[in-house]
Image (cartoon, rainbow, N blue to C red):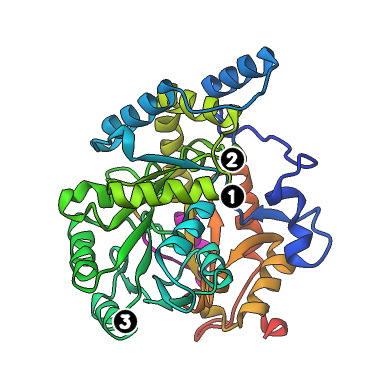
Amino acid sequence: MDFNKIIDRHNTGSLKWDFMARYFGKETNELLPMWVSDFDFVCPDAVQQALAQRIEHGIFGYSERPQTYYDSLISWFATRHQLDLKQEWVCSIEGVVPGLSLLVQMLSHPGEGVVVQGPYYGSFSKIISLNGRRLLENPLHEDPKTGYKMDLIHLERLFRTERPPLMILCNPHNPTGRCWSAQELEQLLLLCEAYDVTVLSDEIWADLLLPGESFTSVLHLGERWHSRVISATSASKTFGLSTLRIANFLIPSQALREQFLRRLDAHGLDVFNALSIEASTAAWRHGAAWLDELLGYLADNRQWFIKQVDEYLPWARIVPAQGTYLLWIDCKALGLDDEQLKWVMVDVAGIAPSMGNSFGQAGNGFIRLNLGCPRAYLEKALEGMKRIAFKSANNVHPISEFK
């Protein structure tokens, strides 16, 4: 697979490439998009072939998941993550976020709190607030070696005082790239057990690990926790299938599972996109070699970019990560507020990043960049970011006009 190949995504309805103006407020044809977390790579050949064959059939009536879908999913998790899934656990829906939203409705009442760990994915905030629940933030603490760690003391206090029924966990964590260890997850679940909190674990990034790292699901920790954990998964992030929307909520508890399936029925979510089923099945059955090659490319992208930042961008500090293809970059040394930082990135660097403040207050002064692209895009982004200078104790650089 040639991951260096440049493929023009303009005029394809791409949110990342065609709709920047909606979010950045100006004509952005010359802006390099580094924001939306999808790939600028073609998906595996096996997926394209499966889709082409299904399209050639030409009939697209109501579809259900065949046994091959379940078998490929279960085999993937057994081989990739040494996780033994039961077929009856698998509850499918068109996307992780819609499923989380239904679970928020199902497992909490209006006015109750739902805990997230900041910086947090912006859609978590949206589904909590728009469903009439209160977002309760447990800010993560940054560790110089591992990146971020949970503040379990603050979390215990939050559980004790607010009595929330739910917590949304992100593992690996978006935007920081932190993979939570078995020990951290067990400490978290002990608190959840003590305060009767159910954990919704968004594990969509689980396959996208850095070399030498491993992923621990909440489902790895044993049956003791099955009554209060739900894992959300999908092939979409792993294989670049975001628009072919199908996600799987793995629910070991029969009571929770039956309740969720009734909720799906109540919303008429009882059939599935035939192309989504084909794409996911083919990816899990035949995509391992493609993914291994991709992970090597992404790791090289990360290593290269970090080296360039260390050499050329003294104002940028990259947070250590164990997974994802995201860079979480501390830009506070520039001394700019978030709106100024946004327009320096746009007007000076010529890039469109995800702004850190969209991930809550803990993201102020940060940007998130997407490394899931050909190296040429990263080189262009770096050249743009080199134009951003700053005033330090020993050197004066021309950025004062943006302060």
Q: Upstream in the sequence, badge 1 or badge 3? A: 3
Does dot 3 land on a helix, a strand or a loop?
helix
- Distance (Cα) linking label 2 and label 3: 43 Å
- Are dots 2 and 1 in contact, CB under 8 Å? yes
Check disc 3 and report the residue beneath it. 158
- Whether residue 200 sits left or right of residue 337 in the image: it is left
- Are dots 2 and 3 in contact, CB under 8 Å? no
Does dot 1 land on a helix, a strand or a loop?
helix
Q: Quadrant of residue 152?
A: bottom left
Pinpoint residue 42: horizontal percent, then vertical percent. 60, 31
Amino acid type of the residue that numbered disc 2 sits on in the rendered structure: Pro
- Marks 2 and 3: which is nearer the front? 3
Q: How crowded is mark 1: few (under 14 residues within 10 Å), some or many (20 or more)?
A: many
Q: Residues within 10 Å of mark 2 (few under 14, many from 20)?
A: many
Q: In which quarter of the image is residue 350?
A: bottom right
**Nearer-the-camera pick, 301 or 168:** 168
**Nearer-the-camera pick, 119 or 331:** 119
Examine the structure image and report whether residue 312 is included in the region drawn in magenta: yes
Residue in view at x 38 percent, y 25 percent: 72
- In the rendered image, the quadrant that contains the C terminus is bottom right
Check disc 1 and report the residue beneath it. 378
Tell me the magenta residue range. 306-321
Pinpoint residue 284: horizontal percent, then vertical percent. 42, 28
**Nearer-the-camera pick, 230 or 121:** 230
Give the farthest residue toward the right: 27
Residue in view at x 46 percent, y 35 percent: 294
Please say if 167 is above or below 211.
Answer: below
Amino acid type of the residue that numbered disc 3 sits on in the rendered structure: Leu
- Distance (Cα) linking label 1 and label 3: 40 Å
Tag of residue 101? none
